[in-house]
Amino acid sequence: MMIFHVVTIFPEFFRGPFDYGVVGKAVEAGLLQIRIHNLRDWTFDRHRTVDDRPFGGGEGMVLKPEPLFLAVESILPERTPDTKVVLMSAQGRLYSQAVAREYACLREIVLLCGRYEGVDERVALHLADDEISIGDFVLSGGELAAAVVVDSVARLLPGVLGNEASSVRESFSSGNPLLDCPQYTRPAEFRGWKVPETLLSGHHEEIRRWRARAALEKTARRRPDLLEKYWKEKGSTNEQRVAHETDSPEKAHGHS
Ligand code: 9D3
């Protein structure tokens, strides 16, 4: 059972995000634990100070190292290969599904949420195993980013999605590098917009081919970067590409 720790100056922030949906159910079912820690619990002055002014001058405040070091040392007294301390930071390496898969193998993870203008660099250098950003945009702190990491890792854990067979999850989380195909549900016509005929046909082979093509087309339009990577990894020609993708799903997604 994996344990997620979150260290934050806003513990109330996490009332909510994990109480619903897949993660909430998994917590209730005892498949994982999420423990929220208040960084101020490791301060000992009257004002429970967690921040201070940057050496060298400049705007804003910086999180002090000591409360973060004490927090980690008390939350995770034993650091082992199946534990990780991760600093959520705009300066971190980019988070991805591959990193989520890596974290899903851990027994215990501690997510440190930065605030203000940043965190004393000694936390990144000498406390955290990893420094992670969730994308090239500016957040007000690490809390939303930590919630993203918890959600994306939790759904990879055995039993969380209902499908115990990890191979079922694999085909979505790592086997298919393209965007999902478009989905439709009833009604077959909504405000004059019709569902593609093929999907109503009941011809499973045709439906599979339509979906493969639609996924490829949507990826080409919206995420040409993913398509480029996909082709490079396959090392196939343009003509082979469409043929291959519309062939069998096993071949197309490389799990034979
Ligand atoms: C605009 C302020 N920046 C220039 C001096 C630095 C900055 C400091 C603190 C930028 C963002 C933050 C707070 N962000 C995070 O703690 C954070 C974050 C993010 O901003 N983007 C993507 N991933 C993450 S993970 C943590």
Image (cartoon, rainbow, N blue to C red):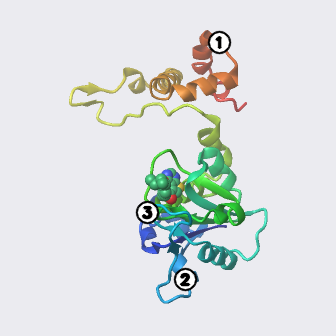
Q: x, y (%) of residue 118? A: 52, 61
Above/below status of 94 relative to 129: above
At 51% from the left and 63% from the top, the residue drawn is 57
Residue highlighted by disc 3: 20
Image disc number at residue 237 = 1
Query: In the depicted view, which residue is nearer to us: 48 or 221?
Result: 48
Q: Position of residue 132 (x, y in %)?
A: 60, 53
In whole angstroms, how far apart are the C-alphas of marks 3 and 2? 27 Å
Can you say whether 46 is above or below 252 in the image?
below
Looking at the rendered structure, the kind of residue marked 2 is: Asp
Residue 165, image x, y percentages: 66, 49
Q: Residue at x 63, y 61 (%)?
A: 86
Q: Amino acid at mark 1?
A: Thr
CB atoms of marks 3 and 2 within 8 Å: no
Q: Residue at x 67, y 44 (%)?
A: 167
Say left or right for 230 vs 148.
Answer: right
Q: Is residue 79 visible?
A: yes
